[in-house]
Amino acid sequence: MSQALQLIGPDHWTEMAWRNGGGTTSEICAETRDGALLWRLSTAIVERDGPYSVFPGLMRISTVIEGQGTRITEAGTDNWREIAPLVPSRIDGDRQIEGRLVNGPVRYLNLFFDPARLAAQVSVMRLNGGARTGNSPSAIFCVAGDCAIATSPSTSISAMTLVRDIPAETHLTGEATLVSVVLQPT
């Protein structure tokens, strides 16, 4: 069986300014529908404490893929919670969020999506040998290491590469930390 996978490495990312002007993000891929953002996957390096950009009508799932993590709270409150490394965390894009770095800069993998039109799940997998993808993920991002995807011919991905259009129950082999993104219409 032949399966065309889409590989997106850093050379194909689009750098853009944060909405709040505090830094830059690298858009890996995105989809719009009817002139509105349906979903977007991006990375951002955060080097200092400060406010998050507001994304009205969207949900954000942030995963720290480099660094020690961040503590966040809704602006004007003192209800801090930690975003630990490799633990996906949901953040309502409508809320004004303040962040504090735990111990130096971090890099996030961020999924933004319209919760009125999509359900989303982000999970982290540490691949040590072999595993199956389960339900068809929308995308897999390789955080670290290398992974082979059992398609014909076999496809290899390495750190900081996204692969899309993966069939359900596809066999993966290698030593890697992977982030799986599943998007389904609501």
Image (cartoon, rainbow, N blue to C red):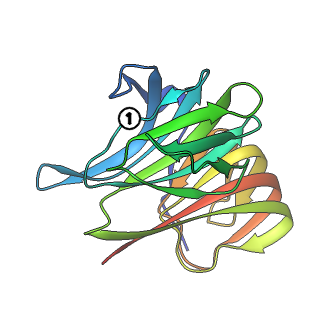
Is the N terminus in the top left, top right, bottom left or bottom right quadrant? bottom right
Disc 1 crowd rating (10 Å Cα; few below 14, some 14-19, many 20+) is some
In which quadrant will I find the C terminus? bottom left
Q: Mark 1 — residue?
A: 53
Is residue 128 in view from this perspective?
Answer: yes
Amino acid type, residue under disc 1 in the picture: Ser
Q: What residue is rendered at 66% in x and 39% in y?
A: 70
Q: Classify residue 179 by image quadrant.
A: bottom right
Residue at 47% across, 62% down: 165
Rendered view: 10 above or below 7: above
| Residue extending farthest left | 34
Whole-percent x and y of residue 19? 32, 29
User: What x and y, as percent, mark residue 153?
Assistant: 63, 60
Image position of 125 (left or right of 93): right
Q: Nearer the viewer, residue 32 or 24?
A: 24
Residue 113 vertical placement versus 171 (above, below): above
Residue 22, relative to residue 2: is it above or below?
Answer: above
**Residue 8 at what x, y percent from top left?**
51, 41
